[in-house]
Image (cartoon, helix red, strand yellow):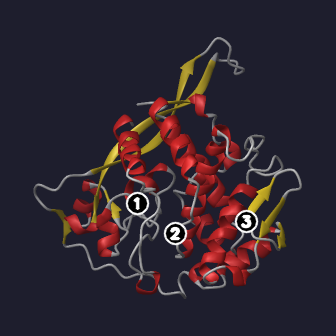
Amino acid sequence: MAELTQRIIAELEEGVKPWVREWNPDKCLGPQSPFNPVTGSVYHGINVLILGMDLRAFRSGDPRWVTYQQAHEKSWQVRKGEKSTTIFFTKKHQVDDKDADEEDGKKTVRVLKHYAVFHATQIEGIPPYRPPPVEEAPWQRPEAADIILRNSGALIRIGGDRAFYSPYSDHIQLPPENAFRGPREWAVTALHELTHWTGHKSRLDRDQSATIGSAKYADEELIAEIGSAFVSIALNIPTELTNHVSYIDHWLTKLRNDKKAIFRAAAAAQHASDFILGFHPEYAAKMASDPHRPESPATIPAASDIDPA
């Protein structure tokens, strides 16, 4: 956990946001959602960051990661000397708690566990990667962002030269589309603001009471940054969004003082991106059929109930 946090700190200190990478979406080279080709499930939360920070996926255009055992069961061979990448998951445990509401005096906590995976380029015998055609992934069509924004029912006002979300009036403000370099840039900005919109008390209920530009607001901005990146990766549109340098300073301070902060931010970002992507009918249907999909936000425990491994 501490090693991952330090790695993210190092990238931020270099001015690189590790959830953002350059790529050419027209050639399908770059950040596609990392997934397990054996189970067919996509990775979630902090694991999207971890696997997304590995340049092998960007250089190869291959988003597949598997465990050694899974590769072995498929008669694929991890090459000798290859190093694994550590990813994380939480596992439920019951512990004694005299103050617990349950009659047996126990409460359920989550313990952070880890396991090792290998990228497809480290494995011999694995079939070549075939990116899904748009017929299999209709949420990657150019109109996908418009479908999501329309189905969300979010109040969007067009005008002015600023893009923001107001939790007080519960509306998104966007400049006109012709003020952007192109439709993709407009879409990624709109989706970033829609990620803020998910935090309203009537939706995912994040604390949005802080003043924009403050250290506390930087926490919300980190969630929106990562969450909208997750959405953009799924839709195969650019993830880059210019942000004020003061936010990066706030993030660095927080990460240096709290090794679990990036895990909580990634979890909240995943909940927000799942909420948003659920407004695309085909994507929602795909996720509903995934037996390994994450729990709904309403069932996720508080950060204080997650213990490090």
Question: What's the residue at 30%, 72% (across, down)?
Answer: 59
Amino acid type at mark 1: Gly
Task: Tell me if residue 163 can be seen.
Answer: yes
Neighbourhood count class around disc 1 (C-alpha, 10 Å): few under 14, some 14–19, many 20 upward: many
Per the model, the C-alpha gap separating discs 3 and 2 is 21 Å
Q: What is the x, y in percent for residue 301?
A: 63, 36
- Please report contact status of discs 2 and 1: CB closer than 8 Å, yes or no: yes
Q: What is the x, y in percent for residue 43?
A: 46, 58
Point out which mark residue 163 bears: 3
Residue indicated by mark 1? 52
Above or below — where is 199 with respect to 179?
Answer: above
Per the model, the C-alpha gap separating discs 2 and 1 is 10 Å
**Which quadrant is home to the N terminus?**
top left
- Please report contact status of discs 3 and 1: CB closer than 8 Å, yes or no: no
**Which quadrant is home to the C terminus?**
top left
Residue indicated by mark 2? 233
Q: Quadrant of residue 78?
A: bottom left
Residue at the far left: name it: 80
Nearest to N terminus: mark 3 or mark 2: 3
Query: Depth check: 133 or 196 in front?
Result: 196
Q: What is the x, y in percent for residue 215?
A: 63, 38
- The answer to whether 215 appears left or right of 198 in the picture is left
Q: Quick one: SS at disc 1? A: helix
Question: What's the residue at 69%, 69% (across, down)?
Answer: 190
